[in-house]
Amino acid sequence: MTDHPTPSSADSDASGEDPVTQACVHIDAAARQLEAAAEADAFSPLLGLAGLLSLIRGGFDPSIRSAVDPNDPLSPIAHVDRALSLLDGVPPSAGPADLLVWSLRLQDLRDTLMAAVMAQR
Amino acid sequence: MSTTTVGDLLDRAEILARSLRAADAQISTSQWRSFDATAYRLLHELVGPERVGVREQILSHASVSRILNGYPSPLAAPNPQTTYNAKQAANHLGVSHSTVVADIRESRLPATFDGRRYSIKATDLPTADDVQRADPASTNPLDQLTCTLGLLADMVVTERSRTTPTPGFDPLRDDAMVAPVVARVFAMTIVAARDALAHIPLQDADRPLAIAQYAEHSLDALGDVDRPSGLSQVASFAPPSSPGTPNEELEAALRAWAGHARTELATTIPSTEVLRDIANQGRHLYAVSARLATASFTAGHLSEDAARAVHEELRQPAQIMHRLQQQWETVTTATKPSHEYVTATTTLHSTLTAIEQESLLPGDHVEPARRIDLDQAMTDLRYAATDLVELSYTAAQLPEPLIRAQLLFAPARILPSTMERIHDRNHGRYVPILLEEGEALIDAAQKGSSAARQVRATLEISARPTAAVVSSSHLLADGLSRRELHSATRPGGPDLR
């Protein structure tokens, strides 16, 4: 088990990690941003979404976390979109056997996330 | 609402037993035998296996076991897995202990010997083969009573086979809680036997007479059992398979999530992602409970004090759960969450969010199809709070053994640096954490478990009649005994009586 303290910024895609690992970093970064946006309100609806993102990231790989990047230029939706794009690029024979299922879950959650972000505005 | 408690079934059974007298319905010997076998099965499951460990418990249980062992030649084995010792087998066969021992020694009865006692499979004992199951569709009150007792027995089996314990609530291993239920079953047995004596052919009357005499004797032998039993609060759920209303969706989602969470916690090496999600889902459930309490006040179902108390007293536990999930985030067992769990928790999240966004809108803005029965929703969430007591307690037991077994990992870069870890640090590896490095997690998990108990107590108190509803802290300040508050924290599910 190897640690992947990959920066969560947009530059991280060029870090040389495999696409699933990079996708996990983006998912974790999105979750962290949602948590920060909840501003320590334990009743915030954003925390539930952050939890689901972390759970899905754990489905891809439980050992990957993103490093906190205070200057992260991407929004949570943008991170999820990057993750989906990376996952779509994984060759059919590569990646975990249930990659498609986790990707589908992430896609479903992306729509919920979009609605939640719109509601926050 | 598709939730039934042991207390509900006992009440229904007693109403049916009363109706036996009033209905004066004809019954057959076959119907009586079905009741006879079911009553024994229920008693057998209630009494359960022998105790080990604490001497007082062993002695207390022995007296209840002795009463059960006196059941006159049971007509059928309660379940195929049952085993008996020689004395119990003798009671079953209606012969002496020495006869059974002689049969075993002369190979007429298969048995194993562990150096202390014989063990005989129930399936190896000759039993009456003409005991038929009661017809669930029958309108005869005795058949209905038999079916109700059979359901009770099934609930007891399910409760006993739970893989995750609930702290401070284990009524089936507490003879003081089992005895009152056993007494009620004996009372109903006497009534049913008397009814059978009046209706079945005389040549078959020996059996109900023997059972009635046995039940009367046993009722006396149980002694003073006139007290409420926590066992009555044990609940069984049958959520709708195709939920249509928001309430049905909530119930189905909660039951599915709780079931899958239990399964995940029972795995050899649970996923820390799931442990984290349980804390997160608990936080979400408390948030929705608080919103429902506010809506209940608006609808006039809850006093303003009670609604405010629930809202205030749920916020802190929600924060504790949030901190707990942050602690779980720092470690991993490298086990992935199961797909079934993720589906269940996603569905629950969607259902709770839909309730918040569509069913709890102010005024008349709620679409008729999305209207929610607030009382029913609060009842479901109180059951979920009970589930969380059990789940958070079980989860709080996990960090220490996982750490001791070197199964809880964290990136070497975030752990204190040691000579042994330099290599792992440089190579970005995960390493097992030490016990002292897991102290914050252990502490957060225990606080989460306590918070779950506190929430359950708060929700229980809020469910009491409006006049009595004030916050638990006020109750303590105003003189409510700690014992009463403690009883409200017993995690057996909401009292539906």
Image (cartoon, rainbow, N blue to C red):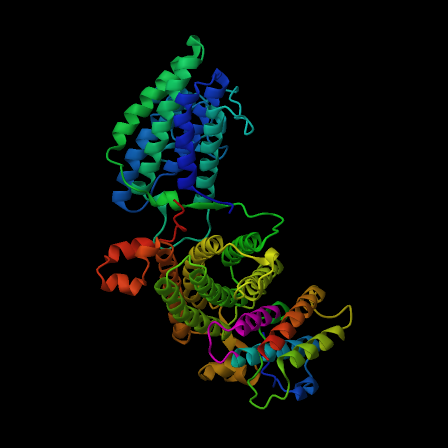
Q: Position of residue B239 (x, y in %)?
A: 55, 48
Quadrant of the rendered image containing residue B68? top left
Quadrant of the rendered image containing residue B441? bottom left
A86 within the magenta span: no
Q: Left of A82 or right of it: where is B151?
A: left
Quadrant of the rendered image containing residue B353? bottom right
* Image vertical order of residue B79 relative to residue B195, above or below: below
A54 within the magenta span: yes
- Residue at the bottom extreme of this rendering: A71
Main SS of the magenta segment?
helix
Q: Position of residue A93 (x, y in %)?
A: 77, 68
Q: Left of A87 or right of it: where is B401?
A: left
- Residue at the right extreme of this rendering: A92
In front of the other: B5 or B129: B5
- Residue at the top extreme of this rendering: B203
* Image vertical order of residue B210 relative to residue A35, above or below: above
In front of the other: B206 or B411: B206
* Image vertical order of residue B184 relative to residue B202, above or below: below
Magenta segment boundaries in residue numbering:
A38-56
In front of the other: B458 or A32: B458
Q: Left of A65 or right of it: where is B297?
A: left
Q: Visible in this render: residue B119?
A: no
Q: Left of B204 or right of it: where is B364?
A: right
In front of the other: B470 or B384: B470
Residue at point 48% right, 23% down? Answer: B34
Numbered disc total: 0
Q: Position of residue B447 (x, y in %)?
A: 37, 68
Q: Position of residue B393 (x, y in %)?
A: 41, 60
- Residue at the left extreme of this rendering: B479
Q: Visible in this render: residue B444?
A: yes
